[in-house]
Image: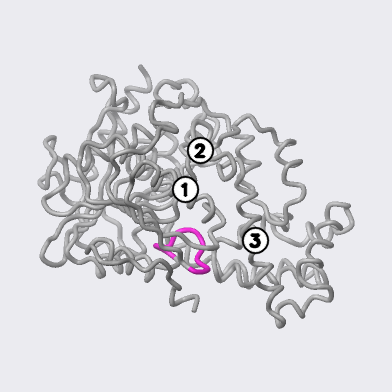
């Protein structure tokens, strides 16, 4: 009963943040919570919609879902729903680029929901709400109580599933959607959520636009438990490109690949403790793996390796002075209230669906990754995440059927959701009869909306207008 009371208080607070009506529709939108210093949000309208926590038991607890709408700037042709990634990202992640997006698609309302468990929508524990000590982030003192709530209220926790989130989208589109064309754009985890929606939806949409397509849930090679392997795959391609460039490879006496392999062997043998002592975080493979996420940081990998080999005492200064600033553009994504990533939601959906090997131990992960050149800390982190997993339902691994047309836009150097995994997922979609178009974005990492928006927008525009879509695109920033 305690958690029902707490949920009611939280929902009431959220409902007070912006105007709502119980009937939904266009009239449901009203003033948004004030956020000073963000002119890109001007003119947007907001709502919090009450939905059933458990879609199969609508008479039970209800939760609030926050949606921000950016009205069309020209004669309205329809709407585009944007689904953030994660799992654990709020819709706020799109706000930094929303002005460009609206300029390119002026005839569409843009609607951005916060998935259940994120942003201004209902959360898994009271410590992740806007009213808590650190807002939607967890303060140090909130971790224990939060996970205590999650386990004590395990039945409630298990309702924050992909399928319930997909039903949320179906409900929101039915309530809040207008006339005209209707498209769903999604990135990363959002692509899996969009496909789950496509399996169960009742609200009609004209098509799905999937940016950085996740692997299929039955893919045992590219699932979340193999994240370091996908990172390593892309990292080795980056080194191979350097090896093929005389100017880059010539900096290394025996070639970059051979010299880096020798360095890693020395680190494993305990002969290069100087690197761990000077590099923030102390793990060179994790650091280089993370640098693959951002093209500006990725370009620094050869120099980072060169310094690690010959001048390890300079690693810390190079990392702080050169690598950290390369990630600066991403920092603006977290400038909005409610933007903190939900580690609890990520852990729940990971252990329940996207990690095919949740039983992996830290020792098993370490042994499996011993020979990799690039790694992700995520695989070890998963072994320390304890969540009450929800059972996989009828939609898990279910074949695809009756999906609307699909556009996939995917980077060739995506270290999170590799192109190979996306292509295997596409094959499964095509086997179900889906009309699907793939656009590969040359040298782009994860999330084309952020790192290759010109390619994404061109492809989307052609897809929406029914024109031929180019199969390959090189972003202006990478030419």
Name the residue rendered at 61%, 72% in the picture: 299
- Whole-angstrom CA distance, mark 3 to mark 2, is 22 Å
Q: Earlier in the sequence, mark 3 or mark 2?
A: 3
Q: Main secondary structure of the magenta part?
A: loop
Which residue lies at the image location 77% right of the left edge and 80% below the top edge?
A: 250
Q: How is the image coloured?
A: one colour
Instruction: Tell me residue 452's x, y (percent).
Output: 43, 68
Q: Residue 461, position in %: x, y?
A: 27, 66
From the viewer's perspective, tell me whether residue 300 is left or right of residue 5.
Answer: right
Asked whether, in this view, residue 145 is left or right of residue 376, the answer is: left
Please name the residue that numbered disc 3 is placed on: 235
Q: Can residue 308 be seen at all in this image of the molecule?
A: yes
Residue at (25%, 47%) from the top-left corner?
67
Residue farthest toward the bottom in the current orientation of the protein: 247
* Residue with the mark numbered 1: 214
Kindly report the distance in space between the C-alpha atoms of the residues bearing marks 1 and 3: 19 Å
The foreground one among 203 and 59 is 203
Which of 252/91 is in front?
252
Q: Residues within 10 Å of mark 1 (few under 14, many from 20)?
A: many
The dot on residue 354 is: 2
Q: Quadrant of the N terminus?
A: top left
* Residue segment shown in magenta: 442-450
Question: Residue 459 in the image: x percent, y percent?
Answer: 33, 65
Discs 2, 1 touching: Cβ within 8 Å = yes
């Amino acid at each position: 009963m305690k958690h029902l009371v707490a949920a009611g208080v939280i929902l009431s607070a959220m409902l007070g943040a912006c105007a709502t009506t119980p009937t939904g529709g266009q009239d449901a939108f009203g003033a948004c919570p004030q956020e000073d210093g963000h002119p890109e949000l001007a003119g947007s309208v907001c709502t919090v919609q009450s939905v059933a926590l458990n879609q199969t038991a609508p008479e039970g607890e209800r939760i609030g879902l926050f949606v921000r709408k950016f009205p069309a700037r020209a004669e309205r042709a329809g709407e585009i729903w944007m689904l953030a990634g994660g799992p654990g990202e709020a819709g706020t992640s799109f706000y930094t680029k929303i002005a460009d997006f609206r300029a390119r698609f002026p005839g569409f309302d843009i609607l951005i929901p916060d998935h259940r468990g994120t942003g201004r929508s209902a959360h898994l524990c009271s410590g992740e709400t806007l009213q808590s000590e650190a807002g939607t982030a967890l303060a140090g003192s909130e971790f224990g109580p939060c996970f205590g709530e999650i386990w004590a209220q395990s039945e409630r926790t298990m309702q924050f599933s992909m399928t319930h989130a997909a039903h949320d989208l179906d409900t929101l589109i039915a309530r809040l959607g207008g006339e005209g064309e209707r498209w769903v754009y999604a990135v990363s985890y959002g692509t899996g959520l969009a496909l789950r929606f496509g399996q169960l939806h009742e609200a009609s949409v004209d098509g799905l636009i999937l940016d950085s397509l996740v692997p299929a849930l039955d893919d045992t090679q590219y699932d979340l438990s193999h994240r370091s392997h996908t990172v390593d795959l892309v990292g080795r391609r980056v080194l191979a490109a350097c090896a093929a460039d005389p100017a880059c490879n010539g900096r290394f006496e025996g070639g970059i690949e051979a010299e880096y392999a020798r360095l890693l062997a020395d680190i494993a043998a305990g002969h290069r403790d100087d690197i761990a002592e000077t590099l923030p975080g102390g793990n060179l493979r994790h650091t280089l793996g993370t640098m693959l996420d951002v093209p500006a940081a990725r370009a620094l990998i050869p120099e980072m390796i060169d310094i690690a080999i010959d001048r390890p005492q300079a690693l810390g200064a190079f990392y702080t002075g050169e690598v950290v600033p390369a990630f600066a553009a991403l920092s603006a994504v977290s400038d909005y209230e409610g933007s903190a990533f939900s580690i609890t939601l990520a852990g729940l959906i990971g252990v329940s669906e996207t990690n095919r090997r949740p039983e992996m131990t830290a020792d098993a992960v370490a042994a499996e990754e011993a020979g990799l050149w690039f790694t992700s800390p995520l695989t070890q982190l998963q072994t320390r995440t304890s969540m009450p997993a929800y059972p996989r339902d009828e939609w898990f691994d279910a074949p695809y059927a009756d999906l609307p047309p699909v556009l996939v836009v995917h980077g060739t150097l995506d270290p999170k959701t590799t192109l190979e995994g996306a292509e295997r997922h596409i094959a499964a979609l095509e086997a179900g009869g889906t009309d699907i178009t793939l656009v590969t974005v040359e040298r782009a990492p994860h999330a084309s909306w952020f790192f290759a928006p010109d390619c994404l927008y061109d492809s989307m525009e052609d897809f929406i207008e029914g024109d031929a879509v180019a199969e390959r695109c090189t972003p202006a920033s990478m030419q």
